[in-house]
Amino acid sequence: MKLSKRSSSLVATAIAAALLMTACGGSDEGEEGGTADGGGTFSIYIGEPENPLIPGNTTESEGHQVISSLWTGLVEYSADGEVEYTGVAETIESEDNTTWTVTLKDGWTFHDGTPVTSQSFVDAWNYTALSTNAQGASYFFSNIEGYDDLQGETDDAGNLVTPPVAEEMSGLQVVSDTEFTVTLATPFAQFPVTVGYNAFYPQPESFFEDPEAAGEQPVGNGPFQAEEPFVQGTGFTVTRFDDYAGEQPANADSVEFRVYADQGTAFTDLQGGNLDVLPDVPPDALASIEDEFGDRFLEAPSSGFQYLGIPTYDPRFADERVRQALSMAIDRQAIADAIFSGGRTPADSVVAPVVEGYREGACEFCELDVERANELLDEAGFDRSQPIDLWFNAGAGHDAYIEAVGNQLRDNLNVEYTLRGDLDFAEYLPLQDEKGMTGPFRLGWSMDYPSPQNYLEPLYSTAALPPAGSNTSFYSNPEFDALIQQGNSASSSEEAIEFYNQAEDLLLQDMPIIPMFYELEQAAHSENVSDVVIDVFGDIDVAAVSVTS
């Protein structure tokens, strides 16, 4: 989302080894194919966001692409994943990795003209953490002292039985308009790395007066502002915020976020000049797109990780041997070659290679071994007469990929399959939270912040079970949780990674998910724009895009 700026010396000492070391993909056509003189408008593809545009309730890519243009957090991330102090925070400091002092810069305002203060962050974090507000990113505050007091007890149907005993975390204290403190339940050296994620964005006072209205027409502090409500199925146009206090104001006058139900339709519009930026090229266009678009086709290293979640709550998939067998029956390289034209790499870990902590070959059961897979199914007493449901979200180009998986399971395990790909993204994700999956389900994960911890705790810890987090396989292992906590409390990045690796080894034995592919970011744009950069998180830096004349 962000271009390279000055890096943080604080974070460099706290987690120097865990930052990314990859380059970003970009296009600089303004120098060759016309001049970029500022102003103008351009359009960008998004899928339908799952929820209203509230940072604390946005844990998926489509909503995040919009929100990242409307807000700026305490820190920012460069296109290659470096943490930079170009946001609202002047410093984030601690002597013990437990109590952190956050000092803000002066001069930041929200789009409604009100100042961004310490209270703006504290109130937003408390709102997101409070369980009765049902925010999807609540989990990200679980390591702050007093978080548990904001969690009510519910019954199996999700009905509130015992309300929270507090509405504010005791670990958050406002010192002044430009300073607040964060006290964690346990030491966490990587805390400054996490707070650039959208869950940690501030909110103006007007948000708390009417959160529903704010979700339709957000008021942020970013380079663009929303002067009209977001329309489901359509999108909206945001305009440049002239009083933006950040280092990179928007180049364009406005950006149209255009919702498409089908990625193929978006690509056709791009070809016809009716769409300017497509962040994700559909797989069936990859074979010829470089010839067609030239240097307007962008490729960049990615933090993205594709996997098949397994509903561990379903008795049919409760035995780890079944999950291991399914994984070993899949020829990932064959699918990558046939479907993605080299744009995917078979996954052999749950941590992407762009992050320190990745270990080549960590996943024993990711190697194709049809004989062993059949032995494991027989040992588990798996019923092969019943087809396996394979789930994926509609309109995003996943059909051929998941069908190829199904064909391999049929050929290698003698198990038929049923494709379940009729739900759009906004319907597909809530069904996972509700334990609605009846078989393996396609998902992807791009890191929220540059740390191996982000590939483990938010997806597989007990504390991250829905609705507080993204553990939609409903995996829970106290030993895994303990290892993650040991990593979080470690005094150095090297020590932390040792514990995270141990947790990953346990996870890859239990196999609540099937690692599939590491992504390569592949985007394309029209001749109407230049300076298009896709970052390691999979986002387009919309503020950097220039409209050419």
Image (cartoon, rainbow, N blue to C red):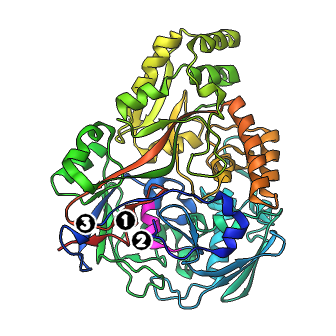
Q: Name the residue under label 2.
A: 217
Query: Which segment is the magenta one?
Result: 65-72
Could you classify mark 2 by the number of other residues whose Cα lies within 10 Å: few (under 14), some (14-19), or many (20 or more)?
Answer: many
Q: Mark 3 points at which residue?
A: 29
What whole-number distance in Å separates the C-alpha atoms at marks 1 and 3? Answer: 31 Å
Q: Residue at x 58, y 75 (%)?
A: 202
Please state which of the two labelled residues, at mark 1 or mark 3, is closer to the viewer: 3
Q: Where is residue 198 in the image (x, y as percent from the top left)?
A: 55, 65
The quadrant in which the C terminus is found is bottom left
Report which quarter residue 473 is drawn in: top right
What whole-number distance in Å separates the C-alpha atoms at marks 3 and 2? Answer: 33 Å
Q: Is residue 71 magenta?
A: yes
- What amino acid type is highlighted by mark number 2? Gln
The prevailing secondary structure element of the residues shown in magenta is helix
Dot placed on the residue nearer the N-terminal end, 1 or 3? 3
Label 1: which secondary element:
loop
Please state which of the two labelled residues, at mark 3 or mark 2, is closer to the viewer: 3
Q: Mark 1 points at which residue?
A: 230
Q: Position of residue 251 (x, y in %)?
A: 32, 77
Q: Determine contact: label 1, label 2, CB under 8 Å.
A: yes
- What amino acid type is highlighted by mark number 1? Phe
Label 3: which secondary element:
helix
